[in-house]
Image (cartoon, helix red, strand yellow):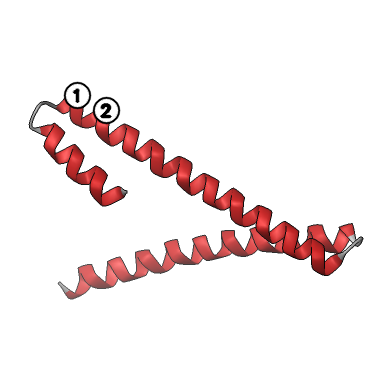
Amino acid sequence: IATYANARTTLEARKGVGKAFITAFRSGAVMGFLLAANGLLVLYISINVFKIYYGDDWEGLFEAITGYGLGGSAMALFGRVSGGIYTKAADVGG
């Protein structure tokens, strides 16, 4: 979807900046909604899988879901930090 949207935005840029902005904004909104929906779907599936494992132990279930969220946040942080490290290494080497 993103590649197709980039091509559409480029073609709309020939007609004007306003039309290109509208196309890019709508494409970004679609990708944002898809990403959020995907995250909620994965969370829903995770809750149901953990519910099968934990049964009536609600405390264990919500601790597992909390760990899932903390793990996602930690991976995002590590990705951001390591991305900055690789960028600086590329700047130094070039």
Q: Residues within 10 Å of mark 1 (few under 14, many from 20)?
A: few
Question: Is 34 on the left-hand or right-hand side of 24?
Answer: right
Residue sitting at 60 percent across and 49 percent down? 40
Instruction: State how many labels appear.
Output: 2
| The furthest residue to the left | 14
Q: Give the labeled residue for mark 1.
A: 18
Q: Where is residue 75 in the image (x, y as percent from the top left)?
A: 53, 65
Residue for badge 2: 22
Crowding at dot 2, Cα within 10 Å, few <14 / some 14-19 / many 20+, comes out as: few
Please indicate whether residue 65 sits to the left or right of residue 22 in the image: right
Query: Is label 1 in a helix, a strand or a loop?
Result: helix
Circle 2: element type:
helix
Q: Which amino acid does label 2 sit on?
A: Ile
In the shown orientation, is residue 22 left or right of residue 75? left
Residue drawn at 33 percent across, 33 percent down: 26
Where is residue 61? Give x, y as percent: 81, 61
At horizontal 39% and vertical 36% (from top left) the residue drawn is: 29
The quadrant holding residue 42 is bottom right
Give residue 38's position: percent from left, percent from top.
53, 51
Q: Residue 91 carries which label?
A: none
Residue 21 lies in quadrant: top left
Q: Distance between the residues labelled 1 and 2?
A: 6 Å
- The residue type indicated by label 1 comes to Gly
Is there a contact, CB below 8 Å, between mark 1 and mark 2?
Answer: yes
**53 lies above or below 28:** below
Measuring from the top left, give residue 85's x and y in whole percent: 36, 69
